[in-house]
């Protein structure tokens, strides 16, 4: 719906401001009613950010799928990048869920969700080069 998409756009804009200040990078993908987000940064900044997310009334039951150290950030070029409008056809998502209508973080592993977001980010980078 329009209001969900408007909230998503607002979350991306606020995240960019906050993440620039705190040194966090990441990506976000939303498709009603779900939001997938990868946050990368120092543990304290990530904990503070998740606490803010968990108390934001726009979110319902935010869940951490994975919280582990990495040697290199996957999305370091972006304070927060919206991958929701990449324009991938619906059938593309079937590699990650049984269908776009059955698209849920509850049916995906953390590895699958990260793979999907990484693939969407790669598509975005390719599209920007054209």
Image: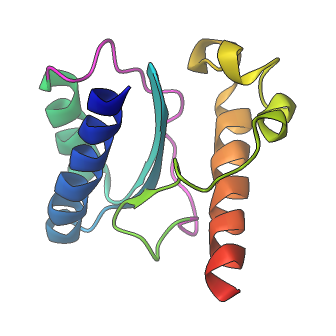
- Horizontally, residue 61 falls left or right of residue 78, namely left
- Horizontally, residue 105 falls left or right of residue 48, namely right
Magenta stretch secondary structure, dominant: loop
The number of discs equals 0
* x, y percent for residue 98: 82, 17
**What is the quadrant of residue 90 in the picture?**
top right
Q: Nearer the viewer, residue 47 or 102?
A: 102
Q: Is residue 85 above or below residue 30?
A: below
At horizontal 52% and vertical 47% (from top left) the residue drawn is 84
Q: Work out which quarter of the rendered image holds the N terminus and state it.
A: top left
At horizontal 86% and vertical 34% (from top left) the residue drawn is 95
Residue 59 forms part of the magenta stretch: yes
At horizontal 26% and vertical 68% (from top left) the residue drawn is 23
Q: Which residues are magenta?
A: 57-74
* x, y percent for residue 34: 47, 23
At horizontal 58% and vertical 66% (from top left) the residue drawn is 71
**What is the quadrant of residue 97 in the picture?**
top right
Q: How is colour applied across the structure in the image?
A: rainbow
- Horizontally, residue 47 falls left or right of residue 87, namely left
Q: Is residue 91 above or below residue 32?
A: below
Residue furthest bottom in the image:
129
Residue furthest front in the image:
2
Residue 32 forms part of the magenta stretch: no
Q: Work out which quarter of the rendered image holds the C terminus and state it.
A: bottom right
Q: Nearer the viewer, residue 67 or 12?
A: 12
Q: Is residue 105 above or below residue 44?
A: above
- Horizontally, residue 2 falls left or right of residue 34, namely left
Q: Is residue 6 above or below residue 83?
A: above
Q: Nearer the viewer, residue 45 or 1?
A: 1
* x, y percent for residue 126: 72, 77
């Amino acid at each position: 719906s329009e209001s969900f998409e408007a909230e998503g756009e607002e979350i991306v804009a606020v995240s960019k401001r906050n993440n620039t200040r705190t040194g966090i990078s990441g990506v976000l993908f939303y498709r009603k009613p779900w939001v997938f987000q990868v946050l990368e940064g120092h543990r304290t900044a990530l904990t503070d950010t998740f606490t803010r997310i968990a108390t934001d009334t726009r979110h319902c039951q935010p869940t951490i799928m994975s919280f582990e150290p990495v040697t290199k950030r996957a999305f370091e070029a972006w304070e927060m990048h919206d991958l929701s409008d990449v324009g991938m056809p619906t059938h593309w998502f079937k590699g990650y869920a049984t269908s776009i209508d059955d698209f849920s973080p509850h049916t995906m592993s953390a590895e699958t969700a990260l793979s999907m977001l990484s693939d969407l980010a790669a598509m975005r980078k390719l599209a920007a080069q054209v």
